Amino acid sequence: MNPVGRALHRAVFAAAAMAVAGAVGAGTAGAAAGVGESVVGLGLVPGLPGLNVAKSGGNDVVLVAQGLAPAAYGAPNTVGGSIANGCLGSGSGILDIGDPAQGYVTSSRVHHYVFTFAPGATATAFSLTLLDWADYLPFGASPDHVYGAELTAYAGDSVVSSDELTFTSSSTRVQNRPSNEFGNLGVSGDACTATVGQPGRAPLSVKGSGITRVEFSFRNKASVDPNSALADLSYALTDMTPPVVSVPSSVSADATGPAGAVVSFDASATDDVDGSLPTTCVPASGSAFAIGDTPVMCQATDTAGNTGSAGFTVHVRGAAEQAQSLLQFVTGIGPGASLAAKIRSIQAALPSRSACGQLAALASEARAQSGKKLTAAQAARIEIDANRIAAVIGC
Ligand SMILES: [Ca+2]
Ligand SMILES: [Ca+2]
Ligand SMILES: [Ca+2]
């Protein structure tokens, strides 16, 4: 519990402050702030671990909650008396608590909030709701009769996006000022009686790429309602994580001709934000791959522009390698050792086309032995392999 906050509101909110103090005492260092505690720093606003809050014009910024001290504002202001941070909802809000040198008087609240993100992180969106704005405007008239509350997003020094709610009023009344757009601001400016979009409950949002900083401020001093709060803070950080690309560990195939083989494979990619993404592989699946080893590189890019990649090798077996494989297959099958002898002779001739006749003879013998010394499946395998090896050497 912020002792200053308690002292400020002790007369009205003593019971609530005592309860809060107990809850806050149970917190741990580095955890999100409790009600009345400072949220200046990184990750202190509950539920927003990546949000960094700066001081507001030099003033501390603290967490507030409905019914509890410190009070950013009072509402409802028409029935049932003034409830601290009334209609803030089940979540919490934040408050420029005021200048300690001035005794934390509400008139010392600046309400110029600066938000940044964890080191190296940027945002694509940011939003908040300004609560209880403009039912109390003690700082006189705006010269042009226009009053505004603005949220601005920056990328470095450049404005990326801004969102502003304005109204016009020629009145100088401090409370319940009539406005052209929203009527009596005592009603449309109070958190409990305002509808969404009125000054008392004003959602502001900005979107863009590479947002490094977001600032909330009132248009001018005359627009400042010291008794207001920011709630519903929300942001979306820029996706900085590349997709994970999945590829086979390796792919191999038999050459089907002198040029190698057409090889197909599966590659996929998943992203932390975008989910499943298409992959692009070079060479692509279904391309002709030459005999030997060919590296394949696959990539996927998420919508934020992060690219992930993964590679593997396609191995295409040539005539000699296929013959060696066939030799192993025939060892111990067929009539005696004649199949193995034929293949050894073929191996000695490869890659010359002088092996063509022997390959034809091997296929012929296998066909002749089908259902006899060879099963039909064994014979078919030998014949197919012999014919394919023949095709690879251009018979
Ligand atoms: Ca107010
Ligand atoms: Ca109010
Ligand atoms: Ca991503």
Image (cartoon, helix red, strand yellow):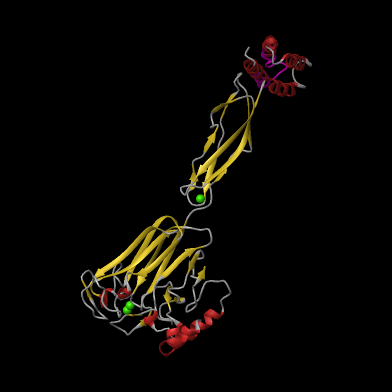
| 196 or 212: nearer the viewer | 212
Q: Position of residue 63 (x, y in %)?
A: 46, 75
State whether the magenta stretch is mostly helix, strand or loop.
helix
Please say if 128 is above or below 101: above
The residue at the point 24 percent across, 80 percent down is 173
Q: 198 left or right of 38?
A: left
Q: 47 left or right of 127?
A: right
**Residue at the farthest right position:** 336
Which quadrant would residue 103 be assigned to in this image? Answer: bottom left
The residue at the point 57 percent across, 37 percent down is 297
Question: Count the marks: how many?
Answer: 0
Which quadrant would residue 109 be assigned to in this image? Answer: bottom left
Please say if 107 is above or below 381: below
Please say if 391 is above or below 306: above
Q: 374 left or right of 10?
A: right
Which quadrant would residue 143 be assigned to in this image? Answer: bottom left
Please say if 315 is above or below 205: above
Based on the picture, tell me whether residue 371 belongs to the magenta stretch.
yes
Q: Where does the magenta region start and end? A: 363-381
Q: Position of residue 5 (x, y in %)?
A: 46, 83
Based on the picture, tell me whether residue 121 belongs to the magenta stretch.
no
Q: Position of residue 17 (x, y in %)?
A: 47, 85
Q: Position of residue 55 (x, y in %)?
A: 46, 73
Quarter in which the C terminus is drawn: top right
| 172 or 9: nearer the viewer | 172
